[in-house]
Image (spheres, rainbow, N blue to C red):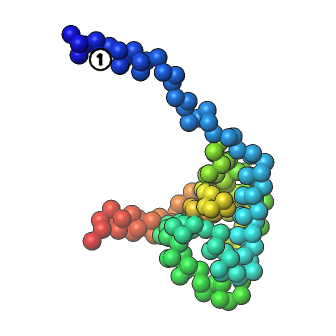
């Protein structure tokens, strides 16, 4: 009986304590304008570093475990592979020159991560870039970037025909790895 009373007393004491505040009530909401401005600056400077062939500056804007997904279906690189691919372009004096036409930025409430998409004027015509940025030691860094060639819906069938042979070969290799 004493054990039962002790359990009841402990249960009563625990139930009378005030509930813990949830983490969502303790965060300070992000200043969206500030985060958006910082992210815009990073992305603009990142594109400028490529146009100016500033290899180290360009890659300093990315996380050490960053990913770059290019326009070719086989281009899904970790940072070190992407550096190897990009180095010859930077060495020739200009890598690529992408000008931003439009950009949307979506920072998280805690301002530690943000998503973005952008339309770019490139040598390929209009491309879409999209990605994820994270705060590393108080600075925004690109963790994941995807570059895509845009295709008007009216022309998609033409592109499907062009890609059919290459895609079927790649699909076969991916489904049947050796």
Q: Which of these two is toward me, 52 or 107?
A: 107
Residue drawn at x 49%, y 70% as measured from the top left: 78
Q: Which of these two is toward me, 70 or 84?
A: 84
The residue most toward the bottom is: 92
Q: Dot 1, crowdedness within 10 Å: few (<14), some or many (≥20)?
A: few
**Which residue carries the number 1 mark?**
7
Rendered view: 53 above or below 157: below
Q: Position of residue 175 (x, y in %)?
A: 33, 62
SS under mark 1: helix
Q: Position of residue 117 (x, y in %)?
A: 67, 54
Judged left or right of residue 120, residue 174 is left
In which quadrant of the rendered view does residue 167 lie?
bottom left
Residue drawn at x 52%, y 29% as measured from the top left: 20
The residue most toward the left is: 1
Rendered view: 110 above or below 86: above
Residue 26 shows in this picture: yes
Residue 152 shows in this picture: no
Residue drawn at x 21%, y 10% as measured from the top left: 1
In which quadrant of the rendered view does residue 171 lie?
bottom left
Q: Position of residue 177 (x, y in %)?
A: 30, 68
Question: Which quadrant is home to the C terminus?
Answer: bottom left
Q: Position of residue 31 (x, y in %)?
A: 75, 45
Residue drawn at x 41%, y 21% as measured from the top left: 14
The residue most toward the top is: 1
Q: How many numbered markers are drawn?
A: 1
The residue most toward the front is: 2
């Amino acid at each position: 009986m004493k054990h039962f009373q002790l359990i009841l007393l402990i249960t009563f004491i625990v139930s009378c304590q005030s509930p813990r505040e949830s983490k969502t009530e303790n965060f300070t909401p992000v200043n969206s304008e500030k985060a958006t401005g910082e992210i815009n600056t990073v992305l603009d400077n990142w594109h400028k570093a490529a146009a100016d062939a500033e290899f180290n500056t360009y890659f300093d804007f990315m996380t050490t475990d960053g990913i770059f997904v290019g326009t070719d279906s086989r281009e899904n690189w970790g940072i070190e592979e992407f550096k190897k691919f990009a180095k010859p372009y930077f060495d020739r004096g200009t890598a690529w020159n992408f000008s931003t036409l439009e950009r949307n930025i979506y920072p998280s409430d805690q301002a530690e991560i943000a998503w973005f998409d952008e339309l770019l004027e490139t040598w390929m015509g209009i491309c879409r870039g999209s990605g994820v940025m994270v705060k590393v030691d108080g600075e925004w860094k690109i963790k994941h970037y995807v570059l895509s060639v845009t295709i008007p819906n009216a022309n998609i069938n033409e592109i499907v025909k062009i890609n059919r042979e290459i895609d079927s070969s790649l699909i076969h290799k991916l489904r049947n790895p050796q």
